[in-house]
Amino acid sequence: MIKAVSCDLDGTLLDQEARIRPLSALALRRLHDRGILVILASGRSWRTVLRIQRLMGLTGPVITHNGAYGYDSSSGREWHRRAVPAVRTREFIGWADEAGVMVRCYLGADYPVVYNRFDLAHQLCWLRPEDRLVPNLASSLAVDPLEIFISGLQSVDGFIRRFGMRGSDYELTVFPHVGYREVNICAPGVDKVQALEQLSRQWSIRSEEILAIGDGANDVEMLKWAGVSVAVGDGLDDLKRIAAFVTPPGSQEPVLDGLSWAFPDYLSAPLSTA
């Protein structure tokens, strides 16, 4: 029987407007209350995932930063980390200081999100009270960041020309946006499945006792590894080919669909969302 459910967020538990799907969230909460470990597994930052976990009324481990970071809100402990070395990050920040480019570093739940500078757009739209400006960040950073972000057009191109798309201790992903691009820097080869493997060891749960639900490319290895896999019907075709169950396309509650399918063969009690 299933002892843990690992659930992706965007396109899975969250809808296209990044809102929590209410019936799916309620079903996961019911599983949590029955002692099944509910793990939110996302490419989003630790603070966003912990906020969603709190809104759902859940506690326990989360997988964030696309598998680079695992944190347990029940105990307040970090249980998994794959990060970019601080010495390498200081090199990046030194370049950014000379170029007048803003750098954002996520260090983990015990630290603020730190910046070398604030640009006006960020101050107006994105700055949070817990964020910290550290003008001498290039020389003072001592914690290995989970993720590093640089935004712009010329700044992103300049960074790639200077450092390339990957090195022995980092790799880049470039995200296009309207009017600008953003480069994400993380440890090489980060994947949700690495964190899930670590979690299974620490919580003494076998892979065959884990049900994984996802919709995107960063869920492929997680669904391959888990004993029971559910692919969102509107998601990636590669996932549908490997999943034990594919939710109906167009469903507004794909997580609920997947959990309902899993009863009674994999879940020991029926779900109620009344």
Image (tube, grey):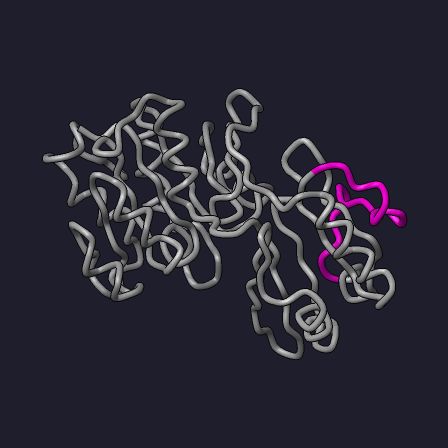
Residue for point 15% across, 34% down: 266
* Lateral position of residue 72 relative to residue 1, left or right: right
Query: How would you classify the magenta stretch by its main secondary structure?
Result: loop
- Is 263 above or below relative to 42? above
45 falls in the magenta region: no
Q: Position of residue 7 (x, y in %)?
A: 36, 44
Q: Quadrant of the C terminus?
A: top left
In front: 189, or 53?
A: 189
Residue for point 30% across, 53% down: 253
Q: Could you say which quadrant of the image residue 262 lies in?
A: top left
Q: Residue furthest front?
A: 168
The magenta region covers 125-143
Residue for point 84% across, 41% down: 140
Residue for point 44% across, 50% down: 20
Q: Position of residue 155 (x, y in %)?
A: 74, 72
129 falls in the magenta region: yes
Q: Position of residue 108 (x, y in %)?
A: 64, 37
